[in-house]
Image (cartoon, rainbow, N blue to C red):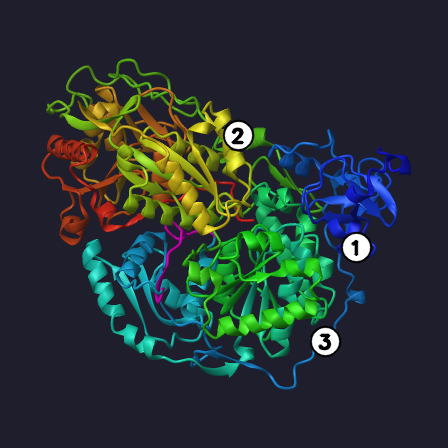
Amino acid sequence: MHDSSPTSQPEAETMLRFDEIGVLPEPGDNVAISSRRLEAGTVIDFSGTPVTLPHTVLEGHRFVTRPVATGEPLLSWHTPFARALRDLEIGDYVCTPTSLAAVAARGVEGLPAEPSAKNEPLDPYELDESALNLGRQVTSVEQPGTFLGYPREQGPAGTRNHVVLMATSSRSSGFVTELAKRFDQGEGFVVPVAHTEGGEDGTPNNLSFLLATLAGFALNPNVGAVLIVDTDGELVSGQAIKDFMAERGYPPIRVPHAYFTRKAGFETDLTAAGQLVEPWLPIVAAQERQEVPLADLWIGLQCGGSDAFSGVSANPLSGAVAREVIRHGGIAVLAETDELIGAEGYVLKNVRDLPTARKFLRTVQSFKERVGWHGHTAEGNPSGGNVYRGLYNIVLKSVGAARKLDRDVRLDHVIDYAERMPGHGFVFMDSPGNDLESVAGQVASGCNLIFFTTGNGSITNFPFVPTIKFVTTTTRYNLLAAEMDVDAGRYLTGTPMADLTTETLDLTIRVASGEPSAGEQAGHSQVSIWRNWRQTAPRPGISITPDGRTTRNLKDLPTEARDAPLPGTPLKLAGYAGSQEGGEESASAPEPPASGGALASPALAPLGAVRLLRVDDRVVPEAVGLILPTSLCSGQIALRLAGQGELEGWAGDAVTRMVALPHTEGCGSSGGASEETFARTMLGYLLHPNTRMALLLEHGCEKTHNDYFRSRLVEAGADPSRFGWASIQADGGLDAVTARVRDWFGSFNLPAPEEVQSTLAELTVALEARGPLTPETAKALALTGREIVTAGGSVVLSSRGALLNDERFRYAAFGSHELVGPTIAHGQRFAAKGWHVMRMPGTDWMETVTGFGAGGVQQVLAHVASGTLSAQRFVPVIEFSSDPETVAQYGDDLDAVASGDASEQAAVALETLAAVASRQQVPKAVASGNVGFQITRGLLGTSM
């Protein structure tokens, strides 16, 4: 209760009018949105009645505008989103348990001790088919407009004209990225499409989506020429794309194009691929824009970093402009399925026909089921940034997101992810709420322009499709003016929506005609395709109730699915003094033969001297300056900053190199076990022995923001003040955050690392094998590991790797034919030195090596046959081979060639490890730029 009587009224000049600080989404709502931060004790004039606010109300959060009794619904856009937990009076702060916790975690003062509301349950939507409004589409204009575009032989005209270098899977992503650099003239004319999918052994569950996306990219009207690159022998290949297009009735690719399969060394292949691309450049560059109808404008509607004003200003504005484009014959495509759950009634307020309505609801239900198989629900969608900025739950987020569908516009079509357009009008495409993954699907469906609305100021862009960014508030627009295009916040301060619609339609036509968007001028872009999911039915411990709700009991989930930490003690193996029992899933090897058995190693020279570095309190092979993005949205900026920092020497002599680790996680994905694995992986790199200086770079609206990692570091016993912290959004955009990061690295006066004599026993090394193994090579790798462990070092193996599954290796290494289980979880640090096995949820190479690095691995030694591997950005990957065919075909990419018996091959392996650790040799894949980094989602992670 609080006092609203006249006796509590302060001086008149301190009172604020409601219309100065509050926004009512629609007349009849009983809560308003605060347009600024209101401290506890602020007095508001509600239609002549002064009310003193009892608690702090942040900008974008809601407060009561008329009394609400216990249990009554709280309404925005006439939609119940929560229910009162007690009698609420005018001015009371509306907060749910989740929103209160999110705000409290940011250190906000003046908050209530208890939440005032609870989320409205998400009951399954039931369609009343008899009451369905089968309306008409908006009236077409009498004289359709035009823009200047690139006409195509088929489909709409392009708004851009790029040469695209497209990887079919993650295995070729480093290749196309490096190839694009060979043609980079600073204009972004030649662009790579590098992504994380299709690189695992076996058939991924997202294969159909992946092939549809890649086929759609090749056919997008903004593509003037395309090179499709695969790796010899992989499942997701150029031929697979051709077959998919033929089976599904896709039209042929009519622009200059070619398929290229990597079959030789990296540099050799770059030269060969470049020779295919070179002749296209003058052809594509010579094409000129022509006047084409606005009907050729196909717009993808997106939102990211949403806030409470998204559904009031930016989304309605993007919907109004889309309405006008449809009136000219164009297409608008809404997506992000889980961000419409709870808003089904709004979406179906005007629909073409009953089959379309039914298909929309089936799509929503299918998405719920897929998420449910992994133990999650749509309620997990709002990110930490969403909640902090006033989107308390999925209902508020969904109803606000649905406002991109203008009230006068009819839903015409429902399509699958990346499906070709069935016709003009307003289209809904199935996709996750993950912005980048959703945009990729829209581009594959044929969109040649993206409208992206944002509350926090998301800077997302796509490589060959321009993005126009709408910001919800003028304050945020002014903070990020260099990265944003449209100030939709002007609607909140009195500019009529009709005026903003006219202005923004004009801007849209100019951008479609070639005017660079803010994102294009900034040069920032990235691609992420709907990531693979592991489950195709509920797991043990997960159940779905008849009404569609997901429940899970972590105790009933297999340890592997939970990816819970293990004790971290090494395998207990005969012949290794001081080793201990392994993890809960480990099996100890039996005693080996007393003499002449597998453990009686051939004589090897003692581990040679290695020139390591004394850095602070430890001896390591290198001292890294790390810029770690807290989510996918800050990844490319982190990469750019690390490159600039390396070039300009921001950290001086204190580090040997600067590294950034861009990834696809931290936002737009589920929580639970996958989030725990993600957090553990991130901390593993922050606390890695090779990391000397580390700065975390947040986008600003992600679930795993800077404050999230501050608390995680405290939990891990680390001091957050040791690290740098920067925010693209809060610091004011790219220029401001660049200055902040530069200043932080330059603020230290650390001594240069000192070279010291040491041995490989100081290091933690991972052993891997990809491709066939000869008996001698299997034994050589076992001997290599034995030498390191016996000398006092540590060796880590993958639980799904070829070595652990090779009986010859196990017998040579452990003196046993028996399988051994994991001692550490994915990305977990071990508790004591020795032999360790890291639990891996999959076989994707980059996810495997990223897990190794998080666990403290400092070098990876991999034997390769029938192909080579990409390197990892942080952990050096050393590739050697004893296979003559591999040496002949890929010899230029190998760091060493081994031959002879096991002891001779092991000697080569140890010598190469020592050379790289001493910084006398740089692994070939690293030197060529064929690098990557990717964090696993485990068995229960999924896009949302």
- Is there a contact, CB below 8 Å, between mark 3 and mark 2? no
- Whether residue 62 is visible to the viewer of this picture, yes or no, is yes
Q: Mark 3 points at which residue?
A: 136
Residue 241 or residue 741, whichever sits in front: 741
Label whose residue precedes the other's in the sequence (3 or 1):
1
Q: What element carries label 2?
A: helix
Amino acid, disc 1: His
Which span of residues is magenta-colored? Answer: 188-205
Identify the amino acid type marked 3. Arg
Q: Nearer the viewer, residue 466 or 433?
A: 466
In the picture, measured across the screen, residue 695 lies left or right of residue 92, that is left
Q: Are marks 3 and 1 in contact (CB under 8 Å)?
A: no
Residue under pointer 2: 711
Q: Distance between the residues labelled 3 and 1?
A: 24 Å
Q: Name the residue under label 1.
A: 78
Could you tell which of marks 1 and 2 lies nearer the N-terminus?
1
Give the percent coordinates (x, y) of residue 397.
Answer: 66, 51
- Answer above or below: position of 503 versus 691: below
Say what secondary structure mark 1 lies in: loop
In this rendering, which labeled residue sits more in front, label 3 or label 1? 1
Identified at 39% across, 80% down, the residue is 288
Q: Is residue 122 above or below residue 167?
A: above
Q: Nearer the viewer, residue 674 or 73?
A: 73
Percent position of residue 250, x then y: 45, 72
